[in-house]
Image: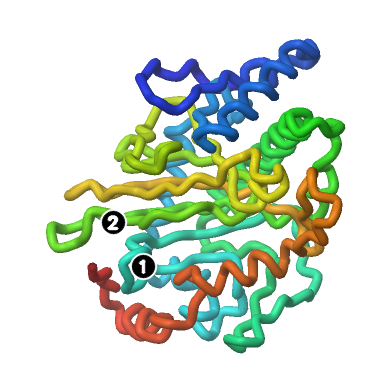
Amino acid sequence: MSRESPTSQSTPLPLIDLSPLSSPNPTSHTVASLSTALSTAFSTTGFAYLTHVPLNCTDTEVFSLARKFFSLNDEQKMSVARNIFRKVNGNTYRGYFPAQKGEDNLKEGFEMGSADRKRKGNQVRDTKKGAGFDLEEENVWPTGFSAERTKLEKLHAELQALSGRLLSLLAMALEKEEGYFDEYMTDSLSTLRLLHYPAPNTKQQDLCCTPHTDSGILTLLHQDATGGLEVLSSDEKSWIPAPYIPNSIVVNVGDLMSRISGGRFKATMHRVRSSPGRERFSVPFFFEPGRECVIRSVGEEGDGGVVYGRHVLEKMRGWVEFGDEGGEEVREEMERGREVLVEA
């Protein structure tokens, strides 16, 4: 079952209709047209809206799930907080992170991987920080959240399947066989992230997420009507608003996909502008290959590649929700039952 037709809205970012993917036997011409449309979008803006997406969960349902999680009390959320925020917890990679002090983290979040993942006991260790992160750990869930858990697990599975189909189309655009990226699906570490940006006050800065590129392969984003997403123009002189369009999702490529394409596809800088007096919810899905998957450029025979697990671990050093700095202070505040304030 596909979503309802999206509402028409003017935007400088391309809109790509995925309705052919819902057909059991799309024609080769249709598939080639989709491949070309994605390639054109990623070679220019690096971003696009996807409409008629083959997902069973509507926008309203997605954000209802996010609201339900963040409406839990602090004790319930901290029961699944990462170990750096609650030492008695064993989870290091999946789970909840509270809002922390810092200019680029005006948000709280919850992360989950595939429901099919079983703990293998493999741990990737960051020796410089002395912190262990189990990239392959199982999901953790708060009590009394079983119905929502089932829906989120299904959403993760559907977004993973959609990512696989998009990768097949991109393989064609890169003049490779459709199954070129199949190995990327093996033991995939893809992450579904629920995010809540509390309503900012007048003392906070204009941005609740500063300019950055995504580090991975593909990002599929559900954003609510609050909006605020902005994409850097191709001439890097202005920011292009990417407003909420009902019944659509936003897709963009990350640094690794840019590398894979030999720079043909753009990992574009983007940011999120605050909306004073309004909270914001977003639900990004980050397609990630397996921990041992080697990422190489399709056009450079001498590219020795990068192992995905090492790549993501290196990137995590700069992500405040995985850093030790501020973690102790957040733990103490939460344990004392006080609200954690986010300062500009």
Of 67 and 26, the residue lying toward us: 26
Is residue 120 toward the left or the right of residue 250 in the image?
A: right
User: Quick one: quadrant of the C terminus?
Assistant: bottom left
Please give left or right for residue 299 compared with residue 238 in the image. Answer: right
Judge by depth and name the residue closer to the eye, 94 or 305.
305
- The answer to whether residue 138 shows anywhere in this view is yes
Name the quadrant containing residue 174.
top right
Q: Is residue 327 above or below residue 309?
A: below
Is the residue marked by circle 2 packed among few (<14), some (14-19), or many (20+) residues within 10 Å? many
> Which residue is identified by label 2?
198
Which quarter of the figure has residue 239? top left
Which of the 4 quarters of the picture holds residue 95? bottom right
Residue 210 or residue 194, whichever sits in front: 210
Disc on the earlier residue, 2 or 1: 1
Percent x, y of residue 182: 83, 42
Asked if marks 2 and 1 touch (Cβ < 8 Å), the reply is: yes
Image coords of residue 159 (percent x, y): 64, 39
In the rendered view of the protein, which quadrant contains the N terminus? top right
User: Which residue, given by chain and number where applicable, does mark 1 sit on?
Assistant: 99
